[in-house]
Image (spheres, rainbow, N blue to C red):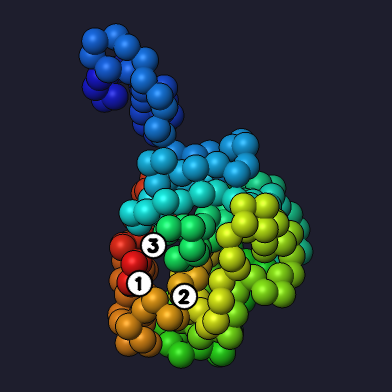
Amino acid sequence: MDIRSPIFKGVNAVKIKKWFTGFVCAGLLVSSSWAIDVATASLPAAINDKRLTIGDRSLKLPSGDWHLIARIKGLSTSNQGTTAKSTTYQAYAVRIVDGKWRGSVIFRAAESSSYVNSWAVEPCKDDSNIYKDDFNSGFKLPECLLVKKRASHLNNPTGALYQDAVAWFKENNIALPIGGVYEVAYFRFASNIYGTVIVFLPQSQTAGDEPVIAWGKGLPERIRLMAEGRADEATLPELPVKE
């Protein structure tokens, strides 16, 4: 199939690929493996091909056994206090190894672009970090990488996303994260669109601050174009954790 064919003119390439996923040249239909659509997926959902999709943008997760276990829906808002009329989603995916938690990823994005030249968020003002880079982005269109050390994760959940995640752990008899965690967060709020990725890692399974910070420093280059709506997909590198 050549998606450059004139018959596909004006049709989104991502959607074309999804239509044809599952077919082989012999004409047999195989089980679908395209990205999980965060908006419509029945939760919980195994993320078999490691991709989470919001609108026409996808985040490819590292190797491992990943499950989408929680999501929330909202609307993007500008600093002028007006609704930007773009539906947004937050997706919480968890990685389980031998029945134990080994990392989580939150993917936040708008389904489509809407006119915004100043966002009603200021994530880069947070100074409770062991590493921070705000790329001199300013407050209207913020971009930053933040690395934090937290005493725990999901032990005292606030907000529906985390509460739903805790419920999944309990329903599946999987122990909640124990001990300290690293939180590595990349935020990019560009003109008219945004995307953010937050990764939680068990401190006990890493080699310490410096390897985690070094891993985090590679995220902006990998995620920026997708967050800005200039690429369909971003890929997270392998997590810096021991199995």
CB under 8 Å between callouts 1 and 2?
A: yes
- Residue for point 41% across, 34% down: 34
Q: Residues within 10 Å of mark 3 (few under 14, many from 20)?
A: many
Question: Label 2 belongs to which residue?
Answer: 202
Q: Is 171 situated above or below 190? A: above
Q: Secondary structure at mark 3?
A: helix
Q: Quadrant of the N terminus?
A: top left
Q: What type is the residue that disc 3 sits on?
A: Arg
- Residue for point 40% across, 32% down: 33
Mark 1 vs 3, N-terminal side: 3
Q: Could you say which quadrant of the image residue 232 lies in?
A: top left
Question: Label 3 belongs to which residue?
Answer: 224
Report the front residue among 57 and 27.
27
Closer to viewer: mark 2 or mark 3: 2
Report the front residue among 147 and 29.
29
Where residue 47 appears, as percent x and y from the top left, is 46, 44
Mark 2 vs 3, N-terminal side: 2
Mark 1 vs 2, N-terminal side: 2
Distance between the alpha carbons at the discs numbered 2 and 3:
25 Å
Q: Quadrant of the C terminus?
A: bottom left
Horizontal placement of 134 versus 152: left or right? left
Question: Label 1 belongs to which residue?
Answer: 241
Distance between the alpha carbons at the discs numbered 1 and 3:
23 Å
Q: What type is the residue that disc 2 sits on?
A: Pro
| Residue 77 visible in image | no
Where residue 5 appears, as percent x and y from the top left, is 26, 19
Report the front residue among 150 and 102.
102
Where residue 132 appears, as percent x and y from the top left, is 45, 85
Q: Is 85 situated above or below 148? A: above
Where residue 71 appears, as percent x and y from the top left, is 64, 51
- Residue for point 49% across, 42% down: 46
